[in-house]
């Protein structure tokens, strides 16, 4: 991914969930990294995932498809995938595709623990 800054990392949350932070656009190249990263979490039996989109200004259809797939997988395993603090542009994409009605979306890290209790 030459010329594009993209980072993905996670940290354990306070309430038995994993907080995944993404920095950079989720295009086709980055989508591959997101998919691999989320697969590794599920392989470690982590099924409660919060994806922080605060530093993501763009997500393409592949990225949306990947997040949708993992939302479904997490729910099948008795967990969930929550989107945290999507920026205006990403939020608009979620609204246009009606995925804002499918994904749990929160705008503060303080809401995460209450959501999983």
Image (spheres, rainbow, N blue to C red):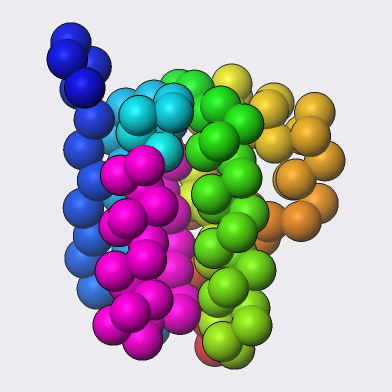
Residue 109, by quadrant, is bottom left
The quadrant of the image that shows the N terminus is top left
Q: Residue at x 52, y 38 (%)?
A: 63
Residue 36 in magenta stretch? yes
Frontmost residue, 27 versus 51:
27
Q: Residue at x 56, y 87 (%)?
A: 77
Left of 17 or right of it: where is 91?
right
Frontmost residue, 112 versus 83:
83
Residue 30 location (% of width, % of height): 34, 33
Q: Residue at x 36, y 42 (%)?
A: 32
Residue 4 location (% of width, % of height): 23, 17
Q: Is residue 116 visible?
A: yes
Residue 66 location (% of width, % of height): 54, 49
Residue 69 in magenta stretch? no
* 112, above or below 106, in the image: below
Frontmost residue, 79 versus 76:
76
Left of 37 or right of it: where is 3?
left
Residue 29, by quadrant, is top left
Q: Residue at x 44, y 28 (%)?
A: 28
Residue 17, by quadrant, is bottom left
Q: Is residue 114 visible?
A: no
* 31, above or below 112, in the image: above
* 93, above or below 12, in the image: above
User: What residue occupies the far top of the structure in this picture?
Assistant: 3
The residues colored magenta run 32-55
Left of 32 or right of it: where is 105?
right
């Amino acid at each position: 991914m030459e010329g594009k800054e993209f980072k993905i990392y996670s940290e354990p949350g306070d309430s038995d969930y994993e907080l995944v932070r993404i920095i950079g656009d989720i295009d086709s190249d980055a989508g591959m990294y997101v998919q691999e990263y989320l697969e590794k979490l599920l392989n470690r039996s982590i099924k409660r995932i919060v994806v922080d989109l605060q530093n993501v200004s763009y997500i393409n259809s592949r990225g949306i498809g990947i997040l949708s797939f993992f939302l479904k997988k997490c729910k099948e395993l008795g967990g969930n995938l929550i989107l945290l603090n999507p920026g205006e542009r990403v939020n608009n994409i979620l609204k246009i595709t009606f995925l804002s009605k499918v994904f749990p979306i929160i705008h503060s890290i303080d809401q995460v623990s209450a959501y999983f209790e």
